[in-house]
Amino acid sequence: MTSRPYRRRTYRRRKNVTAVSLLLLVLAVVLGPAPSAAAGNDWWVPGARPTPDAQIDVTGEPFTGTDAQGRVRGFVDAHDHLFANEAFGGRLICGKVFSPAGIADALKDCPEHYPDGSLAVFDFITKGGDGRHDPVGWPTFSNWPAHDSLTHQQNYYAWVERAWRGGQRVLVNDLVTNGVICSVYFFKDRGCDEMTSIRLQARLTYDLQAYVDTMYGGPGKGWFRIVTDSAQARDVIAQGKLAVVLGVETSEPFGCKQVLDVPQCDRKDIDAGLDELYALGVRSMFLCHKFDNALCGVRFDSGTLGTAINVGQFLSTGTFWKTEKCAGPQHDNPIGSAAAPGAEAKLPAGVRVPSYASDAQCNVRGLTDLGEYAVRGMMKRKMMLEIDHMSVKAVGRALDVLEAGSYPGVLSSHSWMDLNWTERVYGLGGFVAQYMNGSEQFVAEANRTKALRDAYGVGYGFGTDMNGVGGWPGPRGADAPHKVTYPFRSVDGGSLIDRQTTGERTWDLNTDGAAHYGLVPDWIEDIRLVGGQSVVNDLFRGAESYLDTWGATERHQAEADLARGAPATASSTEWWNPFTSYAPGRAVDGDRDTRWASEWSDDQWLRIDLGSVHRVGRVTLDWERAYGKAYGIQLSTDGVNWQTVWSTTTGDGGLDTARFTGTPARYVRVVGTQRGTGWGYSLREVGVHSG
């Protein structure tokens, strides 16, 4: 794909800098950064850094510029949660990304975890045991951060800095929260409104950028750069800095929850919400997460966690998950029947989590009409859709919509879609990243999809999901084969990376696992040793591929619909309701709430007159429940002589896209030969495009 015209951007603070942001800047200068003995002419070394602070333990200049073909280099983390400590009521994840008062204030445990973790309720829910641990962070870090501690800060800014120094060039910061988890958790220091938390996390990301800038001499000079378009990201990476993209992963975006199957939002709420998020700098988002909402059904969680989340689903919506047999090879995660006593105790008396048939593994809920409106709204705003966490039914429809519009802005950022969707994502021009699994598992999955990446000429990404309550790679052991040997060279060969030290604690990936974000370079080295250079090479091309997807999304222009408002005729029209018309023109009026419907017999047709001869290469058909199982697309220049350019005998309804070699035509005819139901044929909209 061609790149967007190259432009350098001047970075400026947002105009609506808050009083809190200004206070942070003042405190950062007064209390935090101090002159550094290492400060000199090296652009990557700050002139001032908080004292004391975490060590970076990377020497050598970060690589800058692009390769000989003008492509950026570097790794992409497509899914991280820098400020999840501000979510869920503010006390679920303990510790801060940064603090103007210094590391001792940033990396300390939640108050209720002292003196021995006895009240670390979420810790023992997620980790097992009794939750007891040494709560002291700085300077000893005896028990946290750790690869299996899901309640402590893993994204301290200096650890992110180390990942950047080790070769990472794109970081997607997903603003995240969950109102139900917030409401049922024992400890909180704020309200549970999801959009309030999203706004706060967005503002703090800009505050972190300003905090880093103070160490380097002022606005725009630090390594942490928030970007809002792909050209800006390329410019940042060419300078050798980290491009930070804002995303959103929350359960009730725009207030779009549902209660007893009744949506609590409307199209105006969706438009206002998308406009607000875009103004905040958000460029990618999930439409549903963990709980079914008014936009889409979710991909289930399994085991004890799945039971607990199903309880949350009931508390949020008044309904438990509902399943059905899957229509295709894709399926949602099994729900399982493991007990979650702590969560189940929250249910009203007499209410029990239902059991589920093992052969019914798909969520009955797909993409709702409001959800489809949101997808199309994201397309209008050139935003990228995250399909992880959507039910397979919802993903299938979302991909149909994107394919019908040839829209490339689709992401799978952390292994939460059915893997059978991978080629459809690549076919659209989308981007795929794998969850931060252990090196053996990561390599195995990377190798499984290697041929697809080669066929589509794309790189690969990872999604650390740190601060995301997911669990991270454990240690392979000091005596494991192909263990990481310190110090080691960065992938580009320009930096030397040693064990990371913060305070009195030094981490070693071999014995500690991926305990915090600073160990991302160590984990990549582990992948290289276990799986070979090929996997790492694909990861090193990840930033370029992510930006290719983003750039193509920005450049996308919706093709004119040649059929919109055109004269239409049909073999027949159903008539049974004197107040509703099912006339042929209803299929080309641009309104999905209207439709053409035929009489109830197999051999039927719908003909559209484009007014003059056009090149036609794509026809989209949005079926109502009465669909065609066998039908074809015919073209004609004179309305007399017809050529069949596309046909199927396996139609299954939904949104179909027929692609074929561009052919001159004035007339387009949809010819049905076998119905998929006992009714006739019913089309909400037919679109005709050049190709």
Image: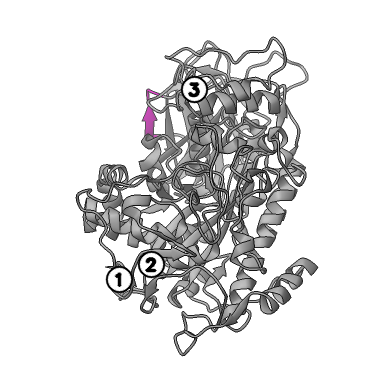
Query: Could you tell me which secondary element the residue under label 2 belongs to?
Result: loop
Query: Which residue type does callout 1 highlight?
Result: Asp
Is any atom of residue 342 visible in this view? yes
* Residue at the spot of label 2: 167
Q: Residue at x 62, y 68 (%)?
A: 102
Spatial CA distance of label 1 from label 3 is 43 Å
Horizontal relation, residue 636 to residue 311: left or right: left
Residue 376: x and y in percent read 61, 45
* Residue at the spot of label 1: 492
Horizontal relation, residue 62 to residue 171: left or right: left
Is any atom of residue 5 visible in this view? no
User: Which residue range is magenta in the image?
Assistant: 643-650
Query: Which residue type does callout 3 highlight?
Result: Ile
647 falls in the magenta region = yes
Query: Which residue type does callout 2 highlight?
Result: Gly
- The image quarter containing residue 270 is top right
* Residue at the spot of label 3: 335
Whether residues under marks 2 and 1 lie with C-beta atoms below 8 angstroms apart, the answer is yes
Q: Earlier in the sequence, mark 3 or mark 2?
A: 2
Density class for disc 2 (Cα within 10 Å; few <14, some 14-19, many ≥20) is many
Residue 528: x and y in percent read 25, 56
Spatial CA distance of label 3 from label 2 is 38 Å
